[in-house]
Image: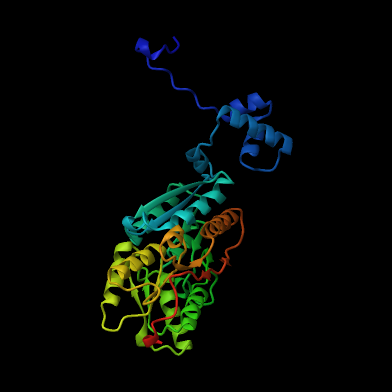
Amino acid sequence: MTAAASGDGVRPRPVRRPTMKDIARRAGVSESAVSFALNDRPGVSPHTRARVREVAEELGWQANSAARALSGERAGCTGLVLARPAHTLGVESFFLQLVSGIQEALSARRVALLFQVVEDLDTELAVLRRWWAERRVDGVLVVDPRVGDPRPALLASLGLPAVVIGGIEADAHQAGAPLPVSNVWADDSGAMASVLDHLHSLGHRRIVHVAGMRGLAHTERRIRSLRVEAARRGLREREVRSVTTDYSDAEGAEATRRVLDQPVRPTAIIYDNDVMAVAGASVAAERGVVVPRDLSVVAWDDSALCRVTHPRLTALVRDTPAFGRLAAQELLAVLDGAPVRSVQGELPHLEARESTGPPPAEDR
């Protein structure tokens, strides 16, 4: 007896998922030809490949990732684990833009992105091990490289294809040894030099850097670069320094309050992201500190927030979605057999806006 309408109290029979056999029958080809066509393998003509894919789309066929993994084929999915406090993600535009670029590149190859937020690095390591053991992903993207980062070595030992987004520190692999996994990176040192050039040329000598989280490789590089670039310009170490935060607007604001309440306050503050810069400018207004007359403000990452705030914030500008696309394309290349390598992204450029100007005359 076939399924009746739901009003008769009979549950409708589930619609059967189309199979490769169904596609082969409809397309008039063998099942092996369907498999070759759908898995991008040689052995079928371009006409047959196009016909098979057309029929598969008409029937609504989707690959069974579990079955493909068990058979040794790709799962059609890549992974990204983010070990950061969840409350810091909702206000920062960088990761949204990065993931949008990643997804754009992956979707062009019909590859899915499995994304998970965890509380700490140990949990991230456990997730990576589980994903690989369960064949959930074909490869992973790794963000927020750390000083003493255990992930590159783990991924290499598992044989899990990976691309680290950000520079891998020297202590993540033995000196002179090949990189354990591929990475794409941006020149934080060059970016910091451009910020210092701008502020120094305006006459600033007391500069505070409100940095991100301690232990992240790029945070440490920026802190180190600030010291090096300040010394190169003859600035005294006690007048140019960094304080660390969790990237949130709350900690950015609190750090600003502390430095502005000191007897000798800075004449310029560099913030490691846009939300902290906006929060810091707001604190300055609360204190009666006028931007840029009394205090110059620079945001490391540009966003719409920087451009709609009054005054508009000077910021480092880069194409973050393009950086995400580059990382995803590099991972796809690794999955296709490309060698492990290090790829540099574009250098961010500083766009000077109304939030930076000369310091007060008495501080020059």
Please indicate whether residue 352 sits to the left or right of residue 269 in the image. Answer: right
Position above or below: 6 against 86:
above
Position above or below: 58 against 358:
above
Q: Tell me if I can see residue 231 in this picture.
A: yes
Q: Residue at x 49, y 62 (%)?
A: 164
Residue 34: x %, y % from top left: 64, 33
Please indicate whether residue 141 sits to the left or right of residue 82 in the image. Answer: right
Snapshot quadrant of residue 281: bottom left
Question: Number of marks in the image?
Answer: 0
Please indicate whether residue 55 sits to the left or right of residue 161 in the image. Answer: right
Residue 190: x %, y % from top left: 52, 75
Q: How is the image coloured?
A: rainbow
Q: Camera-side residue: 256 or 361?
A: 361
Residue 10: x %, y % from top left: 37, 13
Snapshot quadrant of residue 266: bottom left
Snapshot quadrant of residue 255: bottom left
Residue 278: x %, y % from top left: 37, 64
Q: Camera-side residue: 120 or 307?
A: 307
**From the image, which quarter does the C terminus lie in?**
bottom left
**From the image, which quarter does the N terminus lie in?**
top left
Q: Residue at x 45, y 90 (%)?
A: 234
Q: Tell me if I can see residue 147 in this picture.
A: no
